[in-house]
Amino acid sequence: MDATCARAEQLRLPSVAFTEHADLTPWVVRPGDAMPDVLARWLRPDGRVAPRPLDVEGYLACLQRCRERYPELRILSGVELSEPHWHPEQTAALLAGGRFHRVLGSVHSVGGRAEPRLVDHAMGDTAAADVVRSYLAEAAVMAASDAPFSVLAHIDYPVRHWPVDAGPFRPADFEEEFRAVLTVLAASGRALEINTRVPLAPELVAWWADAGGDAVSFGSDAHRPADLANGFAAAADVALGCGFRPGTDAAGLWSRRA
Ligand SMILES: [Zn+2]
């Protein structure tokens, strides 16, 4: 976090948000699933991967140290809730006290609450297009829920795991499904994240505006200091082209009403 703040200052960013993961879903893993170290260390005897709970106190203490060290930088607290609509009690407990400025909701799995499979693993079980459709169906359910998040993270998450042999990913092949998610998200009053890990396809931002979506956030999903704000110039161009504008708060969302 310290190195990320140093990078933010170097880039002259006015603000940074650390949306730390709160992975609430214990994912089912099967023999043959890729298990990088980050997952392997969370493997339970019952064959599920259950990330450790977020150390909120440790996180906030670190955030405070960063604020003292980088007084010029606006450092927002944040959390990325994985499938919060499946975990209302845990979510409520985590958010009690209102200690997070930026609360993202995200889907990382398909298969439903009873048999949740990480998207990257599911790509090995099922045709890639079916995984995308299942993913978007779940994202629509989450967007329609009353789960307490304000920004939908990485609506195109399965694209990160899209198999090379399936050819290039074409958002237009899933236009109806994407638009369905965006419509319920807009009705909920939440914002759409323009995640630049894989640059969000410009047509998705246009469909978001069509759906009546009011606001966007920018997320580089960096995980490493060197990746902070990667792709933001291009993402800002896309957002501007769709009518989104920055407001007076440099740490705020961009809005079509700004
Ligand atoms: Zn995520």
Image (cartoon, rainbow, N blue to C red):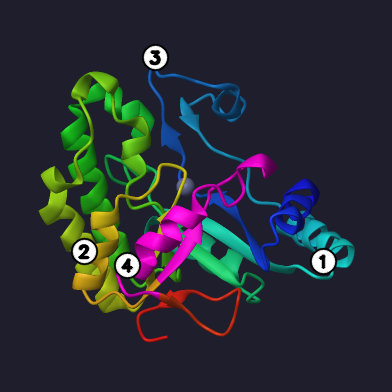
- Residue at 12% x, 43% y is 173
* Viewer-nearest of discs 1 and 3: 1
Q: Which residues are magenta?
A: 216-244
Q: Are marks 3 and 4 in contact (CB under 8 Å)?
A: no
Tell me the kind of residue under disc 1. Answer: Arg
Q: Nearer the viewer, mark 2 or mark 3?
A: 2
Closer to the N terminus: mark 2 or mark 3? Answer: 3
**Residue that label 1 marks:** 67
Q: Secondary structure at mark 4?
A: helix
Q: Secondary structure at mark 3?
A: loop
Name the residue rendered at 19%, 71% in the picture. Answer: 210
Mark nearer the viewer, 3 or 4: 4
**Residue 14, above or below 11:** below
The residue singled out by tag 2 in the image is 207
- Mark 1 → mark 2, Cα distance in angstroms: 37 Å
Residue 250 relative to residue 255: left or right: right
Q: CA distance from mark 1 to mark 3?
A: 44 Å
Residue 110 higher or lower than 42, as above or below: below
- The label nearer to you, 1 versus 2, is 2
Q: Amino acid at mark 3?
A: Pro
Instruction: Say which label, 1 or 4, has the lower sequence index.
Output: 1
Q: Which residue is mark 3?
A: 31
When asked about the image quadrant of residue 203, the answer is: bottom left
